[in-house]
Amino acid sequence: DIESGNNVNWERFKKLKGTENKTSTLDAFDMKNFCKFFKDLYGKPTLTQQAIEELNKNAPPPKKADSDASQEALDADISRSEITEAISNLKKGKAVSEDLIANEFLISSG
């Protein structure tokens, strides 16, 4: 009981009581330099527009996915082996999602 003083380490308490939080010693000059640092860091684009255009010219064209094969794979039924693999990769002790089904339930239902 803290109220009765039985569980209080008074020596530690006295040490804590003796330490005081000192106020910040930052002044307006420090704040100005702080703001300038981040403006310089994030305020300018890292590449000029000309450099970006040059990179785009030399870049290989994007690969086009086989849309028919991709669509076919997405439209296919989910197989039992895919479900089994997904369940085997679940971790225990995680919070439930919106469906309120715990991973442990899925794992044990095997």
Image: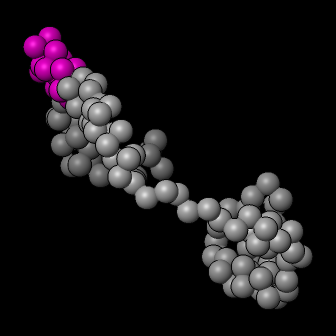
**Residue 74 part of the magenta segment:** no
* In the image: residue 25, left or right of residue 47: left
Q: What residue range appears in magenta?
A: 21-38
* In the image: residue 85, left or right of residue 27: right
Instruction: Give percent across and percent down for residue 70.
Output: 74, 68
* In the image: residue 38, left or right of residue 63: left
In the image, 47 versus 12, the foreground residue is: 47
* Residue lying furthest right: 77
Instruction: Say which quarter of the image contains residue 90.
Output: bottom right
Residue under the image location 39 percent in, 46 percent down: 56
Query: Magenta region's main secondary structure?
Result: helix
Instruction: Give percent across and percent down for residue 67.
Output: 74, 64
Instruction: Give percent across and percent down for residue 96.
Output: 73, 62
Above or below residue 83? Residue 29 is above
Above or below residue 69? Residue 31 is above
Residue under the image location 28 percent in, 25 percent down: 43
Residue under the image location 49 percent in, 56 percent down: 61
Q: Is residue 39 in sight in this rendering?
A: yes
Q: Quadrant of the C terminus?
A: bottom right
* In the image: residue 94, left or right of residue 11: right
